[in-house]
Amino acid sequence: MKRLIWIYSLLFTFILSGFLIFSCAGNQAGAYGEEELYPGETMTDDQAASSDEDEVLRLLGIKDEQVETEPPTTETKDEQQILQDEIGRLESEVTERDRQLASLKNQLEEKDAQIQAKSQTLTQITVPTGTSFKSRYDDALRLYYSRRYNDAIFAFDQLLASGENNSLSDNCQYWKGECYYGLGNYNQAIMEFQKVFNFPNSNKLDDAQLKLGLCYIQLNDKAQAKREFEKLLKEHPTSEYAGRAQSHLGQL
């Protein structure tokens, strides 16, 4: 029945002539069909419909094989191409997501390895109770001179947090400032150098004063740097750093 509908749609543009042909053909087909029946037989509805289809195809000059093997239309081919393109795009997205996940996994593994290495380092520099303050101070200094600034900061913090009123406590505070200066964290270095002045009898007062001026130079604050160097010359005129302070003032 679907084939009949399709065939009728082809005849739509020729409806007037098709209607006349179909009417004539229907009468002929009915007569012809009745002559082919054996006595006592009647034609079923399906047989009648099939006969009508065959008659219309005959009048149009279309063979039944042509209807059965109708090739795909251009529209069907376009739809297939669109589906194939979409499948290809999705496959590409899946491949890219897999690559990104693999990259993230590698990054996480690297970070985990770094954290483990850091934990081992901190464990190594944790000094057992009973070790002298001086020995621990020397160990922290070695970390600084090895440019292991973060490890050195941790070691100096442990010494300062020990609560011992040691003659080297002011030195620990000063070298913390040097560590941050070495890391390029000049604002934090300024804060650490200023804490040295909490030790009024420290032998690092002029050192800290000089470094304050250098920090402000690095921060491009020439006015404050000038004030720090002038303060060094005023409060520590005989300091070994007086010459350097004068030199920097001449360049500002």
Image (cartoon, grey):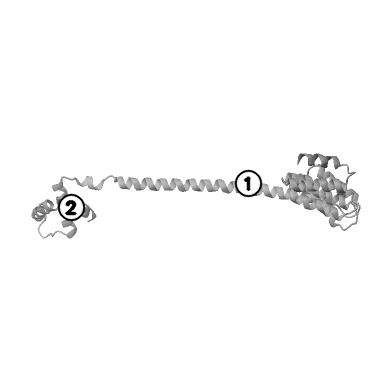
First in sequence: mark 1 or mark 2? 2
Mark number displayed over residue 137: none
**Pointer 2 residue:** 12
Residue 68 in percent (x, y) is at 25, 47
Q: Residue 184 sits in which quadrant? A: top right
Q: Which of 234 and 184 is in front in this view?
A: 234
Q: In which quarter of the image is the C terminus?
A: top right
Q: Is residue 79 visible?
A: yes
Q: Where's residue 220, x and y in %? A: 71, 45
The secondary structure type at the circle numbered 2 is helix
Q: Distance between the residues labelled 1 and 2?
A: 67 Å
Q: Nearer the viewer, residue 41 or 74?
A: 74
Query: Which residue is located at x 59 percent, y 47 percent?
Result: 102
Where residue 41 appears, as percent x and y from the top left, is 12, 59
- Side of 163 where 215 appears, left or right: left
**Residue 159 visible in the snapshot:** no
Which residue occupies 73% across, 50% down? 116
Relative to residue 167, is residue 84 drawn left or right? left
Residue position marked by numbered label 1 in the rendering? 106
Neighbours of disc 1 within 10 Å: few (<14), some (14-19), many (20+) = few
Mark 1 and 2 residues: CB-CB less than 8 Å, in contact?
Answer: no
Residue at the image position 17 percent from the left and 56 percent from the top: 49
> In the visual, does 251 lie left or right of 43?
right
The amino acid beneath tag 1 is Asn
> Which type of secondary structure does the marked residue at label 1 adopt?
helix
| Crowd band around label 2 with a 10 angstrom C-alpha radius: few (<14), some (14–19), many (20+) | few
Q: Nearer the viewer, residue 18 or 164?
A: 164
Residue 121, image x and y in percent?
A: 78, 48
Q: Which residue is nearer to you in this view: 28 or 100? A: 100
Image quadrant occupied by the N terminus: bottom left
Judged left or right of residue 93, residue 140 is right
